[in-house]
Image (cartoon, coloured by chain):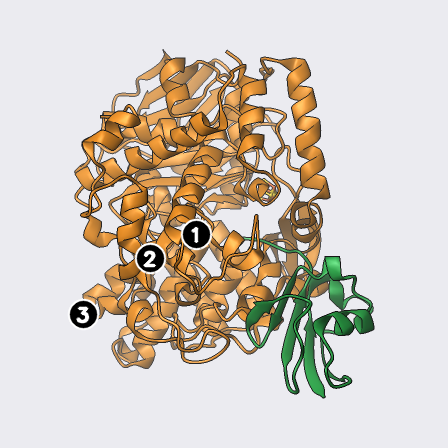
Amino acid sequence: MAGYSGKFLRINLSTGQIDQENLDIELAMKFIGGRGLAAYLLAQEIEPETEPLGPANKIIFATGPLTGSQAPTGGRYMVVTKSPLTGTIASSNSGGFWGTELKRAGYDLIIVEGKSDKPCYIYINDNTVQIKDAKKYWGKLVSETTDLLLQETGDSKARVLTIGPAGEKLALLACVMNDKYRAAGRSGVGAVMGSKGLKAIVVRGTGKLSSARDDETKKVLTNIRKKIRENDVTGKGLPTYGTSVLVNLINESGIYPTNNFQGAYFETADKTSGETLADKYLVKNVACFGCPIACGRYSRVDDVEGEGPEYETVWAYGADCGVDDLVAIIKANKWCNEYGLDTISAGATIACAMEMYEKGVIDSDEIDGPALKFGSGEAIVEWTRKMGAGEGFGAKLALGSYRLAEEYGVPELSMSVKKLELPAYDPRGVQGHGLQYATSNRGGCHVRGYMIAPEILGLPEKLDPSSIEGKAVWVKTFQDLTAVIDSLGLCLFTSFALGPDDYKDMFNAIVGQDWTTEALLEAGERIWNIERMFNLKAGISPEEDKLPRRLLTEPIPKGPCKGHVHRLPELLPEYYKERGWNEQGLPTEAKLIQLDIA
Amino acid sequence: MVVEVKLFATFREGRFNERELELPEESSLSDLLKYLKIPEKDAKIIIVNGLATSVEHKLSNHDVIAIFPPIAGG
Ligand code: SF4
């Protein structure tokens, strides 16, 4: 059936067993694919209390029905597993080319189970699937591993997904990298691969992917491409300056967190902005598979070059650590890519350590590297390297800010939700976005319902960021729509130019269905609830729908949002109601029946 | 009156990054955009003293004005 390969791989690394199984397409469509389908499968196949780094956890690499299609940005895939960082469901999204290659090889997804007793990698060449020895790659950085694996397999057109040394050493901030520079970044998914002894998955696929209704697809996609091209943001803003063009806007809006969220306005933000990056260090723009937007940046400074840094990275290592040295940020970003670390959590954990150090909680005798002082470019670069290499105090940092702060008896200094470090927007000045942080199924994350779009960017319409009125409905709608986009296999950035009807049109034309927009959004809601149920069963109670105390009680000290705190207690009951959950935040039986997941 | 104007992204090309400007009393944002030769429809986000506002907004002495073309990221 168009859109779905109809097959998936189940690979057990304990036994070496490799099975090709048929995908139940009806079931797949109920959860769309990608993130949604993988969440369902994970919930079915593992006990929610499973130890995330034990052999009973599974890790799923899932494409969506539009991955590899001609739909613009259709190159995305998801890594879904139980997170060792948060204990919640993890679903990390990545672009590049790997997802498309997997689909072309004939598989919608791969379920990896068990644990190999020695380092291994999986090589998929269309129908031939092998588990191979990876001893010589263990310990190697991401770019070298990628090059060597391409050499060994002898196919320069193959695509490589790998972990770096951070994942091997079970750093809880480890990500999964593909195509050298693209990251399934959050929730520690790289450590799950590491715990299984799985270094990499190399894929080569030569199949052709078709769409169900050629004429309709052509017509729909012509219209979609036009919308993306003519939209000011996707046609101009993102291609010209990349994501870090946001630095100045978020700063001028007074919601740009500085020094571990102690402030929200960074005087020298412009020194690290997308404009400065373009001026000084940009080599070229880069795009993921099938993407006309090309928001990626390839930068060079001294002997360091590669993709990035993205907006979030610039913030985490920049303002959040009080650093305005773009060269140091580019170097820290490079270490993250090479060692396989989530740039947001890694930078934010260093920021937390800096506050602890400056407050005297961490003693200078305890650390075997540069002083953890806000503003130190040297510190962000060297501590990132040490985190990646699991060296000395760096190994402690690599477990994330929550575990670090808790160990020292100051958990309130970890700016995280459900132990996942918050990204680059201070919720005290954007109420809807803060609600979304508190309720995101994977913890402190901005891309589960990007409320910055309406609250700051005015997309699709401008909302007052400091108001709480009507925000619960917006958050729910954005969360459900995002679940749809992730599950289809498209990039979230398309949503700056497209609306729900556009996704419905692409899905219908390519898969050959006649869904309504409501049905598609209901599938998004179903996915949201499946993830929520997984978390509840895993012991993540609704009490975890919260924000760090600082953001609820300490007003922003200066800048445009001076005096603001987040008003979560007022927002949460309305959100639960909008979701059809009870007052305690538990999905009701009626809601689960309505969504057909009771 | 004197206002501080900050320009971003493509608006910097051929103009400036940040500058103090002397404007006639009672000037509005619309007048400022005309002076800067920025078409109103292109100035998608305007922030005066930290608050997003529209082109009709009347300016006051010492206002800090940030003007952005349509941008996004994430
Ligand atoms: S918009 Fe950027 S991140 Fe999204 S698919 Fe295109 S290049 Fe990749």
Question: Measured along the vertical axis of the image, is residue A104 above or below residue A35?
Answer: above
Whole-percent x, y for residue B61 in the image: 66, 87
- Which label sits on residue A446? 1
SS assignment at label 1: loop
Q: Which residue is mark 2?
A: A398
Disc 1, disc 2: CB below 8 Å? no
Q: Sort mark 2 into few (<14), some (14-19) or many (20+) by Cα contacts within 10 Å.
A: many
Whole-percent x, y for residue A222 in the image: 71, 28
Q: Chain drawn orange, letter?
A: A
Question: Measured along the vertical axis of the image, is residue B74 above or below residue B46?
Answer: above
Which residue is at 43% across, 32% downward? A521
Whole-percent x, y for residue A147 in the image: 56, 38
**Disc 3 to disc 1, how far (Cα)?**
27 Å
Mark 1 CB lies closer than 8 A to ligand 1: no
Q: Sort mark 1 into few (<14), some (14-19) or many (20+) by Cα contacts within 10 Å.
A: many
Kind of residue sitting beneath label 1: His
Sequence-first disc among 1 and 2: 2
**Disc 1 to disc 2, how far (Cα)?**
21 Å
**Disc 2 to disc 3, how far (Cα)?**
18 Å
User: Horizontal placement of A308 versus A190: left or right?
Assistant: right
Disc 2, disc 3: CB below 8 Å? no
Q: Chain of mark 1?
A: A
Mark 3 CB lies closer than 8 A to ligand 1: no
Q: Are marks 2 and 3 on the same chain?
A: yes
Q: Which residue is mark 3?
A: A409
Image colour for chain B is: green
Q: Nearer the viewer, residue B46 or A71?
A: B46
Sequence-first disc among 2 and 3: 2
SS assignment at label 2: loop
